[in-house]
Image (spheres, helix red, strand yellow):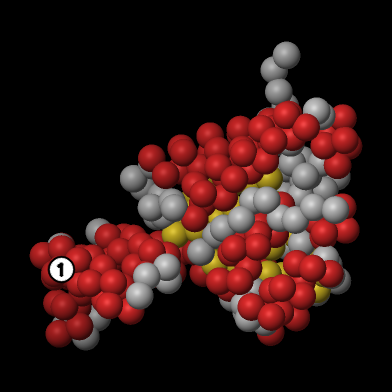
Amino acid sequence: MKQARVITLERKNRVGYIVINRPKANCYEINFHKQLIACLEEANADDEIKVIVVKSALEKFFCAGADIKVFEANTVAENKVMVKHAQMVADKLSNSPKVTIAAINGHALGGGLELAMACDFRLASEGKYFMGLPEIKLGLMPGNGGSQRLIRLIDKSKALELLMTGDHMEPQEAYEIGLVNHIYGRDEFLEQVEAYAEKLARGPLQALIAVKKAVNKGIEMTLEEGLKLEGELVEPLYDTEDAKEGSLAFVEKRVPKFK
């Protein structure tokens, strides 16, 4: 039987919008992940797309994590397969050659917050909703990279507290601890996300990719190793058309037009 379409890819200028639409709470199951992987692969392969935004079509939810009803009905083996697919999604977002943004407009819990943390940036809407990793309350722990990405985004002690209590937080606290990059008013949220994405999309793609690689790989290295990686990544950029355009635009006192 053909599965319902719950994830779509929409293109606008140089930005690809991956839209999640699985009422009532964008909870995921295996079909959800397969469609999300397909959209990510399509966006990654599209040379016109420089930035990927993951957003929700639902008013009150970004993603509430795993569908507990499906999880309960599955065998342990089936749930392990579902978790593997969730891990694949997070890896594809984290390692995408594009800049990735999570547009969080509502509840982002469990695997939903893990999905957002796998992105390069998290932009949040104001509102009365929650973010958190409540897996401990089910006798579990995050399995899609939540524990490892959280400690790389916020203070270790605070991360440990959130992981061990399963407590949730509102957008303002998430911003204050560094989990989200920006908070925008609800009425202007989509407009601000679009402006943020398009600003990045106007940047030099090869340099953006190099910066992402330097940060993601460098954080696991010693300073000496990280500096060596940085040198290896910056050297090829000097001879790019974008670098030449950037220098020329600076001299001519104008905004660069990167290709």
Q: How many numbered marks are there?
A: 1
The answer, for residue 125, to whether it is visible in the render is yes
For the view shown, which residue lies furthest in the left direction? 239
Element marked by disc 1: helix
Percent across and percent down for residue 145 are 61, 56
Percent across and percent down for residue 144 are 64, 51
* Quadrant position of the N terminus in the picture: top right
Q: In the rendered view, does 34 fall on the left or right side of 231?
A: right
Q: Say above or below: 129 vs 32.
A: below
Q: In the rendered view, does 239 fall on the left or right side of 88?
A: left
The answer, for residue 109, to whether it is visible in the render is no
Image quadrant assignment for residue 9: top right
Residue appearing at x 31%, y 73% in the figure: 226
For the view shown, which residue lies furthest in the top direction? 1
| Viewer-side residue, 155 vs 254 | 155
Residue appearing at x 49%, y 55% in the figure: 94
* Quadrant position of the C terminus in the picture: bottom left
Percent across and percent down for residue 8 are 61, 39
Q: Which residue is mark 1?
A: 235
Image quadrant assignment for residue 217: bottom left
Q: In the rendered view, does 204 fall on the left or right side of 153?
A: left
Percent across and percent down for residue 2 are 69, 17
Q: In the rendered view, does 92 fall on the left or right side of 116?
A: left
| Viewer-side residue, 137 vs 235 | 137
Q: Which amino acid, mark 1? A: Glu
Assess disc 1: are there few (<14), some (14-19) or many (≥20) residues with their C-alpha within 10 Å of its C-alpha: few
Image quadrant assignment for residue 222: bottom left
Residue appearing at x 55%, y 59% in the figure: 119
Q: Say above or below: 37 vs 242.
A: above
Residue appearing at x 67%, y 41% in the figure: 83
